[in-house]
Image (tube, rainbow, N blue to C red):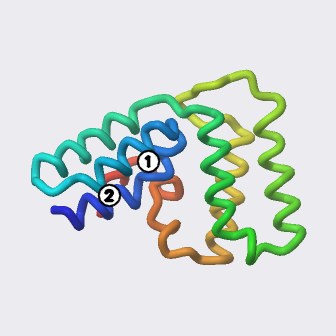
């Protein structure tokens, strides 16, 4: 059961991070301290509950920049400039702090990160729910 929950966490951790860094830290601690079936059931349930929360815009930006870190040393100058341009469009015109679906500028950054993922495969990122269909959050 531990292995499956570790895989579930790997799949969902970036989306959890986008909901709020406090959730991410909570789950990271829970993962380290879990040993029993009840602990793992709690983690499963908690991930499910956190995924129902609204996205926190500053956390979304931070997470997208974190994911960019997987590509920054491989990306061309043009790709870096495109990423910086897209992420900057998410920062200034925004007044919404929380939302339940990604606004268009955020969708564009995620789509660009997905394109970079296709160009520069990262096995760990390919598994993340951020780049999967919405109904597959708990498939390990």
Q: Residue at point 32% right, 34% down?
A: 49
Q: Which mark is residue 14?
A: none
Residue 68: percent from left, percent from top: 68, 61
Q: Is residue 32 or residue 101 the one in the foreground?
A: 32
Q: Residue at point 68% right, 66% down?
A: 115
Is residue 103 found left or right of 19 in the rendered image? right
Q: Which residue is mark 2?
A: 8
Quarter of the image with the C terminus in it: bottom left
Residue 78: percent from left, percent from top: 89, 68
Give the residue furthest to the left: 37
Q: Residue at point 20% right, 42% down?
A: 42
Quarter of the image with the N terminus in it: bottom left
* Residue 110, above or below 100: below
Residue 108: percent from left, percent from top: 72, 49
Marks 2 and 1, how far apart at CA: 14 Å
Q: Which residue is mark 1?
A: 134
* Residue 1, above or below 37: below
Which circle's residue, 2 or 1, is located before the other in the chain? 2
Q: Label 1: state its secondary structure.
A: helix
* Residue 41, above or below 81: above
Local packing at callout 2 (Cα closer than 10 Å; few below 14, some 14-19, many 20+) is: many
Q: Residue at point 21% right, 53% down?
A: 34
Q: Quadrant of residue 69?
A: bottom right
Q: Nearer the viewer, mark 2 or mark 1?
A: 2
Image marks 2 and 1: residues in contact by CB distance under 8 Å: no
Residue 123: percent from left, percent from top: 49, 75
Q: Label 2: state its secondary structure.
A: helix
């Amino acid at each position: 059961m531990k292995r499956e929950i570790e895989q579930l966490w790997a799949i969902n951790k970036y989306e959890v991070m986008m909901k709020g860094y406090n959730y991410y830290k909570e789950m990271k601690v829970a993962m380290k301290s879990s040993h029993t079936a009840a602990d793992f059931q709690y983690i499963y349930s908690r991930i499910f509950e956190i995924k129902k929360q609204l996205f926190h815009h500053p956390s979304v930006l931070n997470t997208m920049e974190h994911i960019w870190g997987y590509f920054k040393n491989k990306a061309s100058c043009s790709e870096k400039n495109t990423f910086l341009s897209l992420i900057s469009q998410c920062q200034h015109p925004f007044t919404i702090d929380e939302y339940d679906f990604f606004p268009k500028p955020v969708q564009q950054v995620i789509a660009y990160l997905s394109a970079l993922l296709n160009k520069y495969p990262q096995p760990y990122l390919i598994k993340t729910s951020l780049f999967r269909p919405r109904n597959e959050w708990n498939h390990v």
